[in-house]
Image (cartoon, helix red, strand yellow):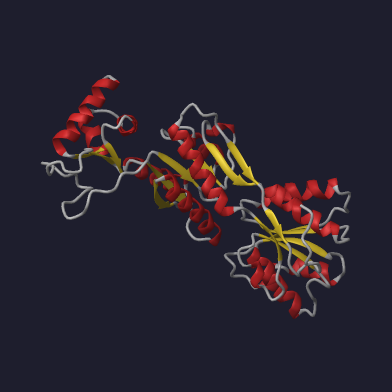
Amino acid sequence: MLADERREAILRAVERQGSITVKALAEEMGVSAVTLRQDVRELAGRGLLTRVHGGARALAPDAAAPTHVPAEFPASAPVPAAEKYAVGLVVPPGGYYYAEVIRGVQKAARALGVRVVLAVSGESLAENREQVRQLMADGVDGLLLMLHPGLRPLDETEEWLSTLEVPAVLVERRAGIRAGRLEQVASDHAYGAALAVRHLASLGYDQVALVARVESPNTALLSVGYADAVKAMGLRPGPEFRVVTNGDAAPADARFDEVLRAVEAGEVRAALVHNDIDAIALVGVLRARGLRVPEDLALVTYDDEVAEMSEVPLTAVAPPKQAVGSWALDLAVRRLSDPATPLAEILLRPELRVRASCGADRRADA
């Protein structure tokens, strides 16, 4: 069926029924839902119908009641207001980090007239594929994907991402060339780690340690930025400690045993710690050993979710989480509005927020 024939059929169905769902009409016409959504978008752009979530309705507000109301629009509920696009957002379960990114998506969605449909993914590729399949079956126009950080194997994940039929943006994650036309928006965590090293060096520390969680998807990037900054500033290479949290069940003094011994021995005087929860826990176990922050250990945390609430307010590197969400949705809308727009990979730089845990409350030169 040619495009003009499909669009005529859509208009006839809307005129006859008052409203249609893309899913049902696509099955009736024997075409893909992705194709039909594009047709509906084109017709709405020409002012011939009104797009709603999952379908379309007639323009005239005083039109006679439709002879058939799709299941998504029960007679007892009002017909949804017009929307520009519907975008699916897939996030991992739990974790305070993602809440701020979601808020950024919500803020941009309100400004752009976009409906966001949230889905929570599991740890396996199969679970992520199923969430995306359901979102696309429900008629989303695009996808924002904040996939589970433990998703493996990477090559199979990227191969799947390259087959997605709607515009998709990877959020706070990075993918390689196998991911095809996938776009990306993320915090520049390597830059953020370098900010912390630079600040500590400006306070006279010639060696900085890195303390980071083994399971964090950002640890590798932090390590790269940390090592580059140490080399660029001519500092003595510091130790890198990897913390195994076991779901935060292990006692803090056991998790930080190597770090504590190094501080007690005077081998480590300054450190970047990822994340806030670990940094605050480290402050507590240091105090229990008779050690003080910043006198015995100058400390910068990476996250700034709860850093200011520490007994000693923590200097922190703050990734621009809300901005990442806002930029990701804006990028998806740009792609939907103009498919010819060049593909983008955007890195947003964190900022340093100086408090008491380094022994200086002055603002660092960033």
Q: Whole-percent x and y of residue 271? A: 78, 62
**For the N terminus, which image quadrant?**
top left
Image-based side of 42 in relation to 288, left or right: left
Front residue of 284/144: it is: 144
Q: Is residue 309 left or right of residue 265?
A: left
The answer to whether residue 328 of the structure is visible from this angle is yes
Q: Position of residue 355 (x, y in %)?
A: 73, 67
Q: Residue at x 72, y 75 (%)?
A: 285
Q: Residue furthest top?
A: 2
Q: Is residue 151 visible?
A: no
Q: Is residue 75 left or right of residue 326?
A: left
- 226 or 339: nearer the viewer: 339
Q: How many marks?
A: 0
Q: Quadrant of residue 28?
A: top left
Give the percent coordinates (x, y) of residue 247.
57, 65
Residue at 78% over, 72% down: 293
Residue 196 falls in which quadrant of the image? bottom right
The correct choice, above or below, for 223 with respect to 5 in the image is: below
Residue, x 62% and y 55% (percent of image)?
Answer: 216
Residue 206: percent from left, percent from top: 88, 57
